[in-house]
Amino acid sequence: MGASGITDPRADRATYREWIGLGIIALPCILYAMDLTVLNLAVPSLSADLKPTAAQLLWVVDIYGFLAAGTLLIMGALGDRIGRRKLLLIGSAAFGLLSLVAAFARSAEMLILARALLGIAGATMAPSTLSLISNMFRDNRQRTFAVSVWVASFSFGGAIGPVVGGLLLSHFWWGAVFLVPIPITVVLLVVGPVLLPEHKTPNAGRLDVLSAALSLAAVLPVIFGIKLVAEGGGLVLSASAVALGLVFGVLFVSRQMALPDPLLDLRLFKQSVVAAALAVNVLDFFVGFGILVLVAQYLQLVLGLNPLEAGLWSIPAGLGFIAGSLLTSVVLKLMRPAHALGFGLALGAGGLALMAYAAEMHSLILIVLGNVLFSIGSAPGIAIVADLVVSAAPKERSGAASALSETASEFGGALGIALLGSLATLLYRSALGTAMPTGASDDAMETALRGIGTASSLAPSLGEGNVLLSAARSAYTSAAAGSFLAAAGIMLLAAIVAVAMLRNLKTRG
């Protein structure tokens, strides 16, 4: 503070050390996103090798996100206590080791377990990175740009993941895609202790493991029940699973309201702006993650692209997301957050509607164009919401606040994979069930109904294989188009919520 009593604004501005540290922080974010996108390209080949059921395949894809979402809160609180840098490095080391396990899984059950543990390891990294940014960048505009870079690093990982994965799948077995994160992990473990600062809360409260267990117990049964319905499972078991999850959810909320130092501070939801922002974030990630598997499978199993070609055609969408993320701070200088969110989400909805039309027309160019429009439109919302939630929290609770934002993101993404995936499965089974070629054997019918991936693995020796595969592709085309339209509606809903609930929020100077 100077002689005039006015605080020097330059005191809060980041130095070159913080900007270099931001580059290091981007590494686990890239790793995190790559692990998701490379798996999408590997789904057809691992389906042919491990022969998972439709339920197992969905768990392979989304158990990672659900366990990450379920354990993010406790990992954010743990980082506040032991140090965010320490937690980041521990999680990164575990991530590398578990990637080796996933790469050499010999059964669907083993791969599901490895993916589940990878989700827990990933949960240690995600809140740590955002929390470190909130402490390293105290200037509002610098922090907004830093959060945009943080988001863009996920996008970059998602963009290069398909390309690297496609190259590996063109020469090696599907498990090779899980080896990609290991070099990044090694670099992070070497340079992280040197270049990243340590932050932790001096007088943090008690770590409540029971609350974390209750949150996980509330999520998994609900998703299991919903997926079981989509796959034609028993309604009694499905309803029981959902009811059990809701009971655990009520217990979780009740416990948080009673604890003096809760795992999830529900008082933040009393602020309408924060609640609306988190709702927008959930819907944004719901759609963004939900369409990843749909697009990857459509490109390969309907349009007939090989994994490398599918990866290369995924680059424009990744670059669009990077561009949208980095332009966030510029856009916020021109309009209020509500208008930036509303316009971007509406643009994303238009891109998804174009993808639905393109799917029916079997147009690769329009699919890519629609995906680019969606990526550009949805990107700013992620950075705006993350910055808003972290900025609203006291510095000593930054880990819990970043975990809350990350939980909304991860929960929305995992929910999108499960629910949009379940919707696509339901539409696919319905369409294929009414168009099943006559004379198809019971075994072939059962295989085809599991999913487009297993339908594509039917042996050419089956006399009905080509006819059945053609019917499966047609059914998946209708399923993908319907799912894209549903996603477009969800994006429009998010745009309405953003404009209506955040209209009075001004851009911070």
Image (cartoon, rainbow, N blue to C red):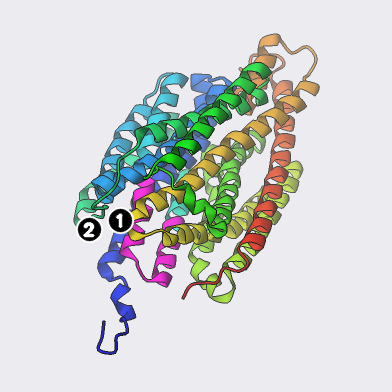
Q: Which residue is mark 2?
A: 195
Mark-to-mark CA distance, 2 and 1 = 8 Å
> How far across and how far down the image is residue 168, in percent?
42, 37
Identified by mark 1, the residue type is Ile
Identified by mark 2, the residue type is Leu
Q: Would you place residue 288 above or below residue 472 in this image?
A: below
> How far across and how far down the image is residue 504, in percent?
60, 69
Q: Mark yes or no: residue 220 visible.
A: yes
Q: Residue 67 falls in which quadrant of the image?
A: top left
Magenta stretch: residue 337 in it?
Answer: no
Q: Which residue is mark 1?
A: 24
- Give the magenta range: 125-151
Q: Are marks 2 and 1 in contact (CB under 8 Å)?
A: yes
Mark 1: few, some, or many residues within 10 Å (few <14, many ≥20)? some
Q: Mark yes or no: residue 234 visible.
A: no
Work out whether residue 203 or residue 26 is closer to the camera in this orientation and state it: 203
Magenta stretch: residue 139 in it?
Answer: yes
Work out whether residue 194 or residue 257 is closer to the camera in this orientation and state it: 257
Residue drawn at 41 percent across, 52 percent down: 402
Q: Which element carries disc 2, helix, strand or loop?
A: helix
Q: Earlier in the sequence, mark 2 or mark 1?
A: 1
**Is residue 77 found left or right of 430 in the rendered image?**
left
